[in-house]
Image (cartoon, rainbow, N blue to C red):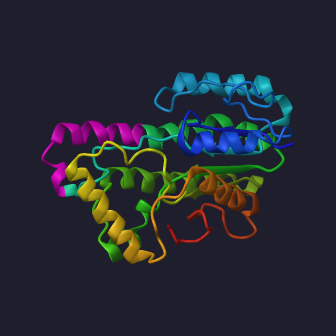
Amino acid sequence: MSVYVITGVSSGIGFGFLKSISEDPQNLEPSQLGKRSNVHIVHGDLTNYATLKQAAADTTKIVGERGIDYLVGNAGFPSQFDAYSPIGELGEEPEELDDVAEKLFKTNVTGNIHFFNLFIPLVLKGKTKKVIAITSGHADLDFINNFDIENSALYSASKAALNIIVAKFSAQYKKDGVLVFSMSPGVVEVGHFGDLTPKQTEGLMKFMGRAQAYAPHFKGPVPVEGAVQTIRLLWERASIETGYAGAFVSQFGNRQWV
């Protein structure tokens, strides 16, 4: 039996993780999915430390001395404000820029610091001892610079900061046998591309075109189910010994983002 704690399971990739993992009755997840007996509902908000602290206490009551095998920081704030626009245009709305940047950092960076700090004591009791942060290929400087990726500037910066935080956790806990690394899931169809304005659609098409220039085989977003399978295969085989400690990788275990 493996024990998983995964944030952000109400929809998208997180819900896909939950469905996939809980299909095996030997796995235990303090999260949510209907009435499956191996799933436990725990509430926590990355922007509210008190709720995360309570979630850790609630999880401790569920798993006891068994601890956690996989701690997955999947939840995040996917900003629509900068998702399809170059950074120069964001400056035309300075107040919203400030608000979105603050929320991105509080959720994607500080929130995950608190989440990891509160739950790693349970990881140390576990058998597998793996901590995975879901990040983004948008944080890769080579990808940005070589293909002039203009969009998602604020989101990209928050994920780049998250990658540094992950490396710092790895530096501290690698000696204890804990594998901590960041993984991008690729471009996944989670419903973010609906109801776009004409201008947003133009920005999305520009990005998709540059993504195809980067990876000619790229045909568009992949379904959640396929993405989850690929991601799980990687986090199950990744290890400190094979060089994943503190790493920032794609769902393929390298720097091929799509």
Q: Is residue 106 left or right of residue 35?
A: left
Corner quadrant of residue 61: top right
Residue 73 versus residue 182 in the image, above or below: above
Residue 125 x, y percent position in the rendering: 81, 40
Q: Which residues are magenta?
A: 88-106
Which is more toward the observer, 78 or 172? 78
Q: Is residue 216 left or right of residue 148?
A: right
Residue 148 x, y percent position in the rendering: 29, 71
Residue 103 versus residue 89 in the image, above or below: above
Residue 2 versus residue 168 in the image, above or below: above
Corner quadrant of residue 174: bottom right
20 magenta-colored? no
Which is more toward the observer, 97 or 18? 18
Residue 89 versus residue 211 in the image, above or below: above
Question: Can the viewer see residue 239 in this picture?
Answer: no
Q: Kindly identify the residue that appears in the image at 73 percent across and 70 percent down.
A: 242
Which is more toward the observer, 246 or 22? 22
Give the total number of marks visible in the rendering: 0
Which is more toward the observer, 65 or 182? 182
